[in-house]
């Protein structure tokens, strides 16, 4: 065997040994059934110059809403309707948004989160919205799981129907009483150049200020001020992470 042939065989052997399985795959929407698209259409009246959060996108919430052991997907959109996809296994999903009654009524949805609000063993969905600016209408919506892959919008009943500038929310049990409380992240809509006096941070603003909401079993109570949560007009929150740091 010639030296060239030996070198070629050795090189092929090395390549074969170094070949690794891909850690991730990128299946198409046709393969998975996940055909969601957060389409936004800029206009002269509504664009990135008028609203600083214009391109921040919607929200994603993952959880097993029907307790079949598979992770389902909820997607909120800015100018489109919400989508709920049931996991059928093997990376196949079914869009049940309409029959599940989770399309939503707000014109600009943002973050979404899943949690068992009423402690019945079923995941519910809380969807944030921006309301009261640039013609945006609606309110934050709470979809209570009925246990049959349908939901009932119940934000008003639980006192969670805020019509403010909400970015996202997170569930937590801060008082360790066994039920889920909510941290609601809101945001300012003015530019950074218009901060004003520093003490504005300490003056609560219902539209822009963050909120800590205690679950009292059937409804939530805003305890933000008593808990020391800052809620001024100069908050620019984008995300939330809950942890026991100490």
Image: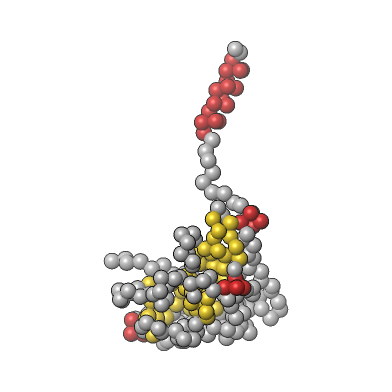
In screen coordinates, is 198 left or right of 140? Answer: left
Query: Which of 188/98 is in front?
Result: 98
The one of 203 and 208 positioned closer to us in this rendering: 208
In this view, the residue farthest toward the left is: 246
State the residue at coordinates (60%, 12%). 1
* Residue 85 horizontal/vertical position (percent): 57, 65
Seen from the viewer's position, the closer of residues 79 and 92 is 92
Q: How many marks?
A: 0
Q: Is residue 206 above or below residue 100?
A: below
Residue 163, position in %: x, y? 53, 85
Does the image show residue 86? yes
Q: Which residue is rendered at x = 49% and y = 66% of the image?
A: 66
> Is 103 or 137 nearer to us in this picture?
103
Which residue lies at the image location 60% right of the left edge and 22% below the top edge? 8
Say above or below: 229 vs 8: below
Q: x, y (%) of residue 48?
A: 63, 74
Q: Is residue 203 above or below residue 121?
A: below
Q: Is residue 2 left or right of residue 41?
A: left
Q: Residue at x 49, y 59 (%)?
A: 70
Would you say residue 194 is visible in this rendering?
Answer: no
On-image quarter of the C terminus: bottom left
Drawn side of residue 235 relative to residue 80, left or right: left
Q: Which x, y percent locates residue 37? A: 64, 65
């Amino acid at each position: 065997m010639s030296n060239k042939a030996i070198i070629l065989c050795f090189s092929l052997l090395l390549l074969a040994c170094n070949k690794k399985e891909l850690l991730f795959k990128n299946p198409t929407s046709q393969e998975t059934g996940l055909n969601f698209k957060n389409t936004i259409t800029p206009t002269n009246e509504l664009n990135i110059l008028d609203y600083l959060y214009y391109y921040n996108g919607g929200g994603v919430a993952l959880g097993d809403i029907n307790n079949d052991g598979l992770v389902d997907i909820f997607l909120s959109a800015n100018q489109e309707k919400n989508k709920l996809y049931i996991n059928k296994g093997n990376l196949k999903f079914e869009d049940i948004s309409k029959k599940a009654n989770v399309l939503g009524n707000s014109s600009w949805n943002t973050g979404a989160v899943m949690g068992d609000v009423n402690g019945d063993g079923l995941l519910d969905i809380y969807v944030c919205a921006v309301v009261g600016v640039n013609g945006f209408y609606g309110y934050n919506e709470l979809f209570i799981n009925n246990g049959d892959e349908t939901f009932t919008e119940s934000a008003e009943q639980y006192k969670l129907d805020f019509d403010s500038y909400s970015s996202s929310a997170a569930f937590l049990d801060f008082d360790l009483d066994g039920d889920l409380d909510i941290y609601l992240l809101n945001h300012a809509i003015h530019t950074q150049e218009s901060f004003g006096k520093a003490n504005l941070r300490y003056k609560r603003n219902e539209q822009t200020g963050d909120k800590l909401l205690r679950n009292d079993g059937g409804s939530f109570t805003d305890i933000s001020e008593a808990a020391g949560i800052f809620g001024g007009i100069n908050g620019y929150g984008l995300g939330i992470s809950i942890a026991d740091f100490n």
